[in-house]
Amino acid sequence: RRCVDGSFGIVLQFSSELAARSERPARGAQSVVEARVSPEAFNYSKADDAEKVGTVQAFLENERAGGLTTILAKASPLGHVVLIPACSRLLPQVLTEDLILGGLHLLRQSGRHDFRLLFDSLMGFADVNHFHWQGLYLNHCGVQDARLPIEM
C-alpha cells in the first residue's frame, strides 16, 4: 500500500487474492453494456458464506429491485464492502432509477460521512455481471479528508 504523490490523496494497494480470482472475465470479452446474468457464471449468490457479513433493508419506491441488500466484506482493501440488492434475483449490472434510489437510501442509512458507493458497468470492466455497489469507508481506505478526488 502506498500513497501517490499529489493533492488527490490517492492510495494504491495490490491484492494478490483479487488478482488471482477465477471469476474475473477476460478484458475486452464483454461487448454489450447490458446482458442477462448467467446462472452458470460466477455471481454473488455463489459467494462464500464466510464473506457475508449481513443484510440491510434498501427501500425502493417501486420495489422492483427493493428488499434486502446482502453485504459482503472483501479481504482487500480495508474498508471495502460489496452490496448486492435483491441478491437472489440476479439483477444485471445495469443502473436503473430504482437502484439509484436504493443506493441513495443505503448512503443515508449508513449515517457515516465517509461512506461512498461506487458503480462499474460491464463495459467499464465490472468483474461480475450481477448488480452490486462497491462500498468504501474512506477513513479506512487511506483517503485524505474523507473525500474522493472528484468531490467538490
Image (cartoon, grey):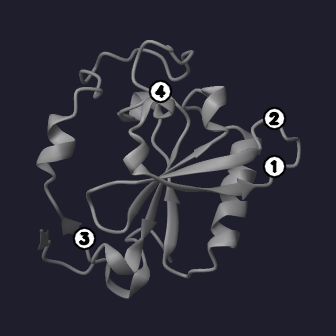
Residue highlighted by disc 1: 60
Count neighbours of disc 4 (C-alpha within 10 A) and say few if under 14, some if 14 to 19, many if 20 or more.
many
> How far apart in space, not on screen, are marks 4 and 3 (Cα)?
27 Å
> How far apart in space, not on screen, are marks 2 and 1 (Cα)?
7 Å
* Helix, strand or loop at mark 3: loop
Identify the amino acid type marked 1: Leu
Residue 90's place in the image compared with 86, above or below, is above
Identify the amino acid type marked 2: Arg
Identify the amino acid type marked 4: Asn
* Helix, strand or loop at mark 2: loop
Q: Earlier in the sequence, mark 3 or mark 2?
A: 3
Residue highlighted by disc 4: 129
Q: Earlier in the sequence, mark 3 or mark 1?
A: 3
* Residue 45 spot, x, y in % from top left: 51, 31
Residue highlighted by disc 2: 64
Count neighbours of disc 1 (C-alpha within 10 A) and say few if under 14, some if 14 to 19, many if 20 or more.
some
* Residue 68 spot, x, y in % from top left: 70, 48
Q: Earlier in the sequence, mark 1 or mark 4?
A: 1
Query: Residue sitting at 29 percent across and 23 percent down?
Result: 25
* Helix, strand or loop at mark 4: loop
Identify the amino acid type marked 3: Ile
Proximity of marks 4 and 2: CB atoms separated by less than 8 Å: no
Whether residue 87 sits left or right of residue 57 in the image: it is left
Whether residue 126 sits left or right of residue 142 in the image: it is right
Proximity of marks 4 and 3: CB atoms separated by less than 8 Å: no
Proximity of marks 2 and 1: CB atoms separated by less than 8 Å: yes
Residue highlighted by disc 3: 10
> In the image as oriented, which residue stretches furthest toward the front?
49
